[in-house]
Amino acid sequence: MHRQERKDLPLKAAERHQLRKRSFDAVARLYDRVRPGYPESLFDELVELSGIPRGGRILEIGPGTGQATLPLARRSFSVLGLELGASMARACRRNCREFPNVQILNVAFEDWKPAENGDCTAPLVPTVPRARRAKTGTVRGKQGLSSAEFDASAPRDCPSFSALPGTVPGFPKTFDMVLAATAFHWIPYKVAYSRCARALKPSGSLALLWNFADTPETKFYRDLHRIYRRIVPRTRLSLLPELRIERQRKKIVNSGLFGPVTILRYPWQSEYTADRYIGLLRTMSDHAILAPQVRRDLFRAIRRLIDDNGGSFIRPITATLFLAPKRQR
């Protein structure tokens, strides 16, 4: 074990979770540059299977810098993104600036409180001069601003909702889809599915996307695992894609609010040089919370391994779509 690992890494899981959840905002620009998107065929089948109407309304949880937001906007959907990170939200707005049907709020999904009268009841919008606002766009990241840094009256970022009979306060039930791309695992289970269901129309659907990395049984990956066991033995390596898929399926079913669950897989792969892969790792929350010296030692060892294996390696990915209609009660 690295001598600094136990001393510097929070021991309580809840503390680590919060640190990881808020780590993305510090690397928003890098995140925008290196984080992969999703296959276009995934979005095509999402539209076809969900039956979402043309121009339908999508509530996106944690859009980051717009990896899923942009493909949805290009398909003429109206997207309201709720992004925890201020820098990530700015990046997402910048990336989506050509699409007036996209609005990005700097607020966590679990804290979002639109009032039934259409006003935003939480301080959601970062104060950005109007001259700059037109130049900002889409994002991928996480972290909040203090209330002093928000302008809750800015109309451009505050969506207008009309109250519906029987609506639960704060959830107007006007969305055709709630979607999260590599973000839903950050939402507390006790509120995640119930808030999604309450935000959806009776005919709406929940769509969850992930890029699950695979670890082939090759010498390179065995050596990579040895590096982690030597330098950061407390780090838990990801489960195989099929195990993660089954675990997520059970969570959706056990919520009792959505189903049946359709699962579609889109295998793809990418070649990584040492620079590109370490850049990707810098955006990973479990690496971001490591002690600086531990992180440097880990990246140095990974760089040496990649260089010793021809300077690049293939990383297989299974992009996965979980699609489940809202259950009728």
Image (cartoon, helix red, strand yellow):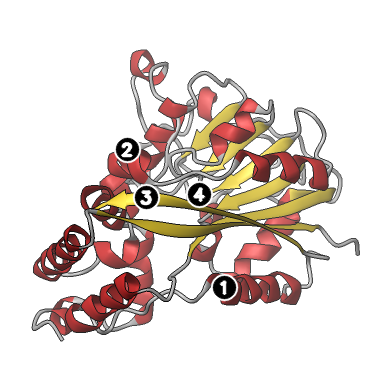
Question: Going from the N terminus, do you reach mark 2 or mark 3 first?
Answer: 2
Report helix, strand or loop for mark 4. Answer: loop
Q: Nearer the viewer, mark 2 or mark 4?
A: 4
Kind of residue sitting beneath label 3: Glu
Question: Going from the N terminus, do you reach mark 3 or mark 4 first?
Answer: 4
Please provide percent x and percent y for residue 273.
26, 50
Instruction: Tell me the distance, in whole angstroms, between the alpha carbons under discs 2 and 4.
Output: 20 Å
| Mark 4, other Cα within 10 Å: few <14 / some 14–19 / many ≥20 | many
Residue placed at 55% from the left, 31% from the top?
A: 103
Please provide percent x and percent y for residue 141.
39, 46
Give left or right: position of 118 versus 112: right
Question: Looking at the image, do the residues carrying marks 1 and 3 touch, with CB atoms under 8 Å apart?
Answer: no
| Mark 3, other Cα within 10 Å: few <14 / some 14–19 / many ≥20 | few
Instruction: Tell me the distance, in whole angstroms, between the alpha carbons under discs 1 and 3.
Output: 23 Å
Question: Looking at the image, do the residues carrying marks 2 and 3 touch, with CB atoms under 8 Å apart?
Answer: no
Residue placed at 59% from the left, 52% from the top?
A: 180
Residue placed at 63% from the left, 34% from the top?
A: 72
Instruction: Tell me the distance, in whole angstroms, between the alpha carbons under discs 3 and 4.
Output: 27 Å
Question: Going from the N terminus, do you reach mark 1 or mark 3 first?
Answer: 1
| Mark 1, other Cα within 10 Å: few <14 / some 14–19 / many ≥20 | few
Residue on which disc 1 sits: 244
Classify 255 as above or below 132. Answer: below
**Marking on residue 271:** 3
Instruction: Tell me the distance, in whole angstroms, between the alpha carbons under discs 2 and 1.
Output: 38 Å
**Which quadrant: the C terminus?**
bottom right
Residue on which disc 4 sits: 62
Question: Looking at the image, do the residues carrying marks 2 and 4 touch, with CB atoms under 8 Å apart?
Answer: no
